[in-house]
Amino acid sequence: MSAGEIAEITGLTLRVALVATLVGIPPAVGLAWLLARREFRGRSFVQACIALPMVLPPVAVGVGLLLLLGRRGPLAPLLSALGVEVVFTWGAAALAAAVVGFPLLVRACQQSFAEIDPRTERLARSLGLGPVATFFRVSLPLARRGVLYGSLLAFTRALGEFGATAVVAGIIPGRTETLALGIWSRVQRGDDAGALLLCAASFALALASLWAAEGWLGRRPR
Amino acid sequence: MSEGTRVRVSLARAGFRLDADLAWDERVAVVFGPSGAGKSTLFEVLLGLHPRAASLVRVGGVLLDDAERDLHLPPERRGLGWVPQDALLLPHLRVRENLRLGAARGGAAGAGALERAIEVLEIGELLERRTTELSGGEQQRVAIARAVASGPRALLLDEPLASLDLELRARALRHLLRLRDELRLAILYVTHDPDEALLVGERVIVLDGGCVVATGPPREVLWSHAVLPLAERLGIENTYDARVVESSAGASVAETVRGLRLVLPFALAAGESVCVGVRAEDVLLSADPPGRISARNVIAARVDRCEASGADALVHLDAREPLIAKITTGAATSLGLAPGARVFAVVKAQAIRRLA
């Protein structure tokens, strides 16, 4: 197995994880704020649904995504109208990773929003800031530690995502073969050396990412 | 708050009810009452946090709530500069950035007012500091300046001195009074401290148990029969605005507008104005001139009336200024303190506190 191949797989993995995280942040932050700040009917049900991808078998999540995005799925007309092919592309891998990491991201953000004294937001409003300005100038900056920590956790989770990705993106060398998928296919082929090399790369990436997350969390608050 | 402030609110929460219907024209009003009286809740309603509780709120002639017309301005459009008790500075912003939060609404007028406030409150040197590096008093002053910068129709100050120790309080109160007089802003000031209520307000609204107990000019209201039990519970004191007329090492003499002279236990420059307070229990009464005595203040006075208060009597005196002495009922009886009786009020200089 060449160094170029390892670099390619690692690069794709990083790209997939990064996109998965970035795509997840806006909806996660929005949902987290709603859950932390608003009382509404069905709140606990929403909370449970958000946690689902964390406990469901990842393969089941993949099948769900496949049903949703596939040729006969409800989103198929929209996707074909946009001329976008998702299934069996690296985009599908990113989407699968985003869904699986989403609960981690929402949890961390929600906790951070809940820790903000609600009077702080009221104070900003009294100074003339509307709800949107209050969110971006006060709530979000005050919750930034949680958002960053959650992002790093989701990113790390995305680096190792396998089950959902394999179903919805397939294992296509050079296109959708991330580290986790690459290890699996090499084990299947009996290429133990290659599998081990990819395991090492996977290990290094995950450790660096977690280390960054914990390091960030351990820094003095604010 | 000037030009017609009207507040009609009714709010019921678990175990608490606030009912108030108030109207006043004075610029500076004080909401006075013990903790749990509903003072902070009243502020929340004014700030627009309980729209359903506010049937009519008009501040400085501007309508903020009118339930009949289903009008409820959102908090950001009410133009009330709120200063909470704990300042609530934003920890992720420096002092200067905190002050800028309300700049969009404050506009040029707010910027001008902010410049004056920075000077009056002496926070010019704090602008680049982190808010976490500030002392309690400094945080409080920054919070007040921040509210001023948002160009409010009125400042809502919620117990701004409650978290400060005595020495800092006097200093903070001086700052506040200067701000009140120089910026000419309408102010609604919440306190449970009768000294502050007397010094700050042109009108006092007394709240207890969610109801308005009394309202009117501070001296009348705080010494009125309806408020006395409450005021006494809070430790009401005699407070005076005075000007220093004599000064020597370690002591000075100050005189009020009506001519009450007091020897103070600290040196002040002649001509300086001070606010001082004396607790009612620190005032002794003597039926005869006390002769040679260590106390520096012997004040000839006339008994206005006596009020029983448990085992004590509150003797209201006319000593050019109103003065209240708290003595035991037995002492009051043996001195024969009938209205009109002449007495001498004795106050140690050491018992006089400087408030501002």
Image: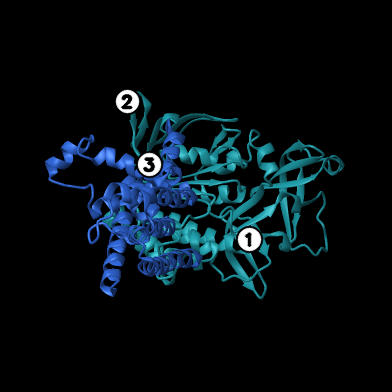
Residue beneath label 1, please? B166
Q: What is the chain identity of the residue bearing mark 1?
A: B
In the picture provided, is A145 more to the left or to the right than B282?
left
How crowded pointer 1 is (Cα within 10 Å; few <14, some 14-19, many 20+) is rated as some
Mark carried by residue A60: 3
Q: At 35% across and 46% down in the image, what residue appears?
A: A30
Question: Which chain: blue?
Answer: A
* Res A171 seen here: yes
Residue sitting nearer the eye, B187 or B46: B46
> What's the amino acid at mark 2?
Arg
Label 1 amino acid? Leu
> Residue A93 appears at what percent x and percent y?
29, 53
Q: Work out whether mark 2 precedes mark 1 in sequence or the reverse, and give the earlier one.
A: 2
Residue at the extreme top of the image, as rendered:
B68
Q: Residue at x 48, y 55 (%)?
A: B88
Q: Which residue is mark 2?
A: B69
Q: How many marks?
A: 3
Residue B316 drawn at (x, y percent): 70, 42
Q: Nearer the viewer, residue B267 or B97?
A: B97
The image quarter containing residue B333 is: top right
The answer to whether dots 2 and 1 both sit on one chain is yes
The local secondary structure at tag 2 comes to helix
Badge nearest the viewer, 1 or 3:
3
Q: Quadrant of the C terminus of chain B?
A: bottom right
How much space separates mark 2 and mark 1, taking CA atoms?
47 Å
For image coordinates 42% across by 62% down, the residue present is B92
Q: Looking at the image, is mark 2 or mark 1 nearer the viewer?
A: 2
